[in-house]
């Protein structure tokens, strides 16, 4: 396996990690009405991560979680930080290697095209950097001129990026950029040779304008796991059917070889108390050291998805984490987390 510094561009998520970061839900976020319920989910998620590696929790000054998690765990690190919301995937910096140098790219976060408040979230990365959260040899790239979210991009670590056209070209993000200009910028900043943009695919209840991490994910350099059209009665069916055909037509960097595709089941339709759809998806998984954490929703498809990923990734444990409460605010496991590769965080912080 390549050493991290031998790679180039946006690092794939399966490389060895220093830690995973989450932002704890609080009374001033959209979680206020179900705070007790969502905190139970965050405890389960935290314990799952802590079993494998270090966990960093962003916590408001007035929030105390000492009764919820074991404070004497050496893998647990609390950082006091104000946030609007918990979807740290979309406002944390992206970890890259550029000509052997470790680089963090901080894009502007504007609440998914100005849908939600983002004044605190957009400052998180810069505050962490100024507080010495990252290793001294990590370079900082300020891209506040470009709106982009971590859940909107996938990297296989060998020059290919995967995203969705409808998110990148959404008018409240980078309206002055053409498709060609956007792709050129991503190639340059994230060290890629190819940007693969899907034009099909949708998960009912998604409010991100089609983040790729709800639809299709690289699990190794040549393999994409995706949500397949397995339920003819699902709203998602025709959209996923079209996306599946599009994925089958994609080619690797040689222009000849198709990607290996791993079909995950559609988790089915979920609705909240007001009848609004909620975006349940098995594509929203998280790599940690030695394992893959898979969102589950209390349905029979959960076990099917676990078994499929066990076969696809035999060297990793596949661990289910109940994420039903997360989709009540239209996100899931990957949306709520951000991994930092080995060597990117300040070793004094990690202890």
Image (cartoon, helix red, strand yellow):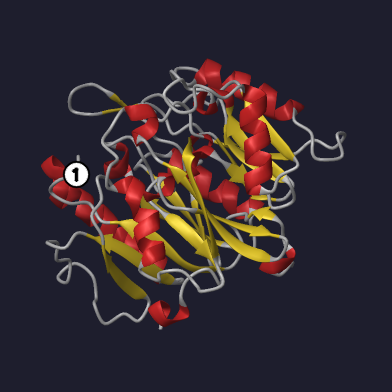
Q: Is residue 150 left or right of residue 127?
A: right
Residue topped by disc 1: 29
Residue 91, above or below 5: above
Position in image of residue 31 (x %, y %): 19, 43
Which residue is drawn at the image coordinates 30% and 43% (left, top)? 326
Helix, strand or loop at label 1? It is: loop
Residue 214, above or below 165: below
Q: Quadrant of the C terminus?
A: bottom left
Position in image of residue 341 (x %, y %): 55, 65
Position in image of residue 23 (x %, y %): 30, 55
Which residue is drawn at the image coordinates 23% and 21% (left, top)? 275
Q: Nearer the viewer, residue 9 or 23?
A: 9
Which residue is drawn at the image coordinates 73% and 61% (left, top)? 99
Q: Nearer the viewer, residue 82 or 25?
A: 82
**Number of numbered discs present?**
1
Which residue is drawn at the image coordinates 58% and 60% (left, top)? 103
């Amino acid at each position: 396996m390549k050493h991290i510094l031998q790679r180039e561009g946006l690092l794939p998520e399966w490389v060895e990690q220093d830690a995973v970061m989450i932002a704890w839900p609080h009374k001033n976020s959209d979680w206020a009405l179900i705070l007790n319920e969502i905190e139970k989910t965050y405890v389960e998620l935290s314990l799952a991560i802590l079993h494998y590696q270090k966990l960093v929790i962003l916590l408001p000054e007035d929030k105390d979680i000492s009764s919820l998690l074991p404070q004497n765990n050496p893998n647990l690190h609390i950082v006091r930080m104000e946030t609007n919301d918990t979807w740290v995937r979309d406002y944390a910096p992206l970890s890259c290697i550029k000509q052997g140098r470790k680089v963090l790219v901080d894009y502007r976060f504007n609440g998914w095209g100005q849908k939600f408040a983002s004044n605190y979230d957009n400052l998180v990365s810069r505050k962490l950097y100024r507080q010495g959260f990252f290793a001294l040899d990590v370079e900082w790239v300020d891209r506040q001129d470009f709106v982009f979210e971590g859940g909107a991009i996938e990297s296989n670590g060998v020059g290919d990026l995967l995203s969705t056209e409808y998110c990148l070209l959404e008018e409240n993000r980078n309206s002055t950029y053409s498709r060609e200009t956007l792709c050129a910028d991503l190639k340059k900043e994230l060290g890629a040779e190819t940007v693969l943009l899907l034009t099909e695919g949708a998960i009912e209840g998604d409010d991100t304008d089609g983040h790729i991490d709800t639809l299709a994910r690289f699990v190794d350099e040549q393999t994409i796991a995706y949500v397949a059209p397995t339920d003819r009665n699902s709203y998602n069916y025709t959209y996923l059917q079209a996306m599946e055909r599009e994925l089958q037509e994609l080619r690797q960097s040689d222009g000849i070889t198709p990607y290996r595709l791993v079909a995950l089941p559609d988790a089915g339709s979920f609705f909240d108390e007001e009848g609004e759809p909620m975006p349940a998806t098995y594509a929203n998984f998280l790599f940690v050291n030695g394992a893959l954490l898979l969102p589950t929703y209390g349905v029979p498809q959960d076990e099917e998805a676990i078994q499929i990923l066990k076969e696809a990734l035999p060297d990793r444990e596949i661990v289910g984490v109940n994420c039903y409460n997360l989709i009540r605010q239209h996100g899931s496991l990957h949306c709520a987390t951000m991994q930092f590769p080995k060597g990117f965080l300040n070793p004094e912080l990690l202890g």
